[in-house]
Amino acid sequence: MSWIYEQWYLIDTFIKSGGPVLLAIALLLLLLWGLMIERVYYLLVLFPVYQQKVVNKWCCRDDKKSWFALQIRQGKLARASLLLKQNMSFLNALIKMFPLLGLLGTVSGMIQVFDVVAVHGTGNPRLLASGISLATIPTMAGLVCALSGLFIYSRLDSHAKKLHAGLALQLVSHQDEKLK
């Protein structure tokens, strides 16, 4: 229990050192990771079930060559594409917000440093250095969050594209089997 308390204390101290912007970054990071976990679960667990249902329905069709059948196949592929891309634009927007929020935290921290300079003057470099150090914490946090999110996002996006291409290939191959 003391380990958990120590970790919570460290996180709390870190967030307080970066100011309210760092709290916003932390909350958005929780949202980002929640959405990413949802996308991973969908792509690895739920979409294969959906894909199998679509392929089974397509295989049961007698007519796979007419214009009407091809439009049905295109509709199924379009629906699969929408399901695979769900929340991906929002994830991309969240990832792009992190560096900007970090910059906002740095600017607000530097304003506080300038207030200290206005009150105490430039005679105490240690006071300036500690203020500048604390002002850069939000930038670092924003960049770390953006980098981790960008890596997972790119993996999710490429996996979704592979799943869509695989479904398209399965539907075409089952169409060709019926013709032989």
Image (spheres, grey):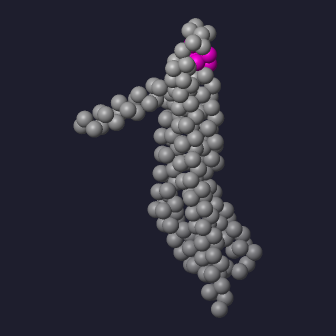
- Rendered position, 64 above or below 9: below
- Residue 1 seen anywhere in this rendered image of the structure: yes
Q: Is residue 140 left or right of residue 76?
A: left
Q: Is residue 114 magenta?
A: yes
Name which residue lies at 65% across and 66% down. 77
Q: Residue 85, located in which quarter of the rendered image?
A: bottom right
Along the line of sight, the residue nearer the viewer: 4 or 122: 122
- Residue 131 seen anywhere in this rendered image of the structure: no
Q: Residue furthest left?
A: 1
Name which residue lies at 65% across and 92% down. 180
Q: Residue 124, located in which quarter of the rendered image?
A: top right
Name which residue lies at 57% across and 79% down. 59
Magenta region, residue range: 111-116
Q: Residue furthest top?
A: 119
Residue 72 percent coordinates (x, y): 68, 69
Q: Residue furthest right?
A: 67
Along the line of sight, the residue nearer the viewer: 13 or 136: 136
Along the line of sight, the residue nearer the viewer: 140 or 20: 140
Q: What is the number of callouts on the image?
A: 0
Q: Quadrant of the N terminus?
A: top left
- Rendered position, 169 above or below 121: below
Q: Is residue 149 left or right of residue 100?
A: left
Q: Is residue 112 magenta?
A: yes
Residue 26 percent coordinates (x, y): 49, 35
Most prominent secondary structure in the magenta stretch?
helix
Q: Residue 58, located in which quarter of the rendered image?
A: bottom right
Residue 69 percent coordinates (x, y): 69, 74
- Rendered position, 111 above or below 94: above
